[in-house]
Image (tube, helix red, strand yellow):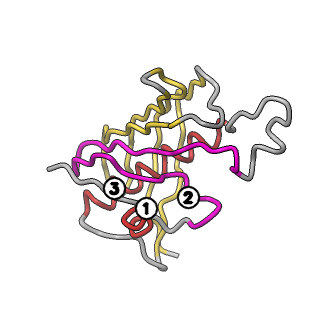
Amino acid sequence: MTVALDIRGVLDFLPHRFPFVLVDRVLEIEPGKRILAQKNVTFNEPFFPGHFPNYPVMPGVLIVEALAQAAAILAFQTQGAKADANSVYLFVGIDNVRFKKPVTPGDVLHLEVSITRTSRGLWKFAGQAKVDGAVATEAEIMCTLRNI
């Protein structure tokens, strides 16, 4: 089954809020398998004035965070659950991160994340962030759901 979500649907599955929501839309979800999400990178992003004033580049850590947010939506959808005030997905590990292409204002970042493993509350994902079909960033991400 493939499901699409607009920003209102995204906010149902993420505890993040402005300025830290890094997923604008979900184009496809196959619960238990994969997600394809989108981040529209605009010049108005709060990090661009300082990173870098003469050559604005989206920070790599925020691209990895965008992949993690897409992964969290996939995990919630897989479990048939939504984000709530009592729990949060947290990073457990990030491996094999590669930054291959700068992401700049005007780019549309496509976030492709697949579940590679789940075990005892730990989720492992393989993710790629692409611009115009070219890989900008790739990473293996591990997360866990924690009650707060």
Which one is earlier in the sequence, the residue at label 1 or at label 3?
1
Amino acid on which disc 2 is placed: Val
Crowding at label 1, few (<14), some or many (≥20) Cα neighbours within 10 Å? few
Residue occupying image coordinates x 54% and y 39% = 94
Tell me the tag on residue 7.
1
Q: Count residues near mark 2 (Cα–Cα under 10 Å), then give few for <14, some for 14-19, many for 20+.
A: some
Q: Which of marks 2 and 1 is in front?
A: 1
Can you identify the residue that label 3 sits on?
75
| Residue in the picture at 54% in, 28% down | 137
Q: Give the range drawn in magenta.
A: 17-45
Q: What element carries label 3?
A: helix
Closer to the chain start, of discs 3 and 2, is 2
Q: How far apart are marks 3 and 2 (CA)?
A: 17 Å
Residue 95 rendering spot, x and y as whole percentages: 53, 32
Foreground pick, 93 / 2? 2
State the residue at coordinates (56%, 40%): 64
The answer to whether the residue labelled 1 contacts the one labelled 3, judged by CB atoms less than 8 Å apart, is no
Q: How far apart are marks 1 and 3 (CA)?
A: 17 Å
Judge whether 6 appears above or below 123 on screen.
below
Residue 120: percent from left, percent from top? 33, 55
Residue 21: which disc? 2
Q: Where is residue 132 in the image (x, y as percent from the top left)?
A: 46, 25
- Marks 2 and 1, how far apart at CA: 10 Å
Q: Please state which amino acid type lies under the numbered disc 3.
A: Ala
Residue 8 placement (x, y as % from top left): 41, 67
Nearer to us of marks 3 and 2 is: 2
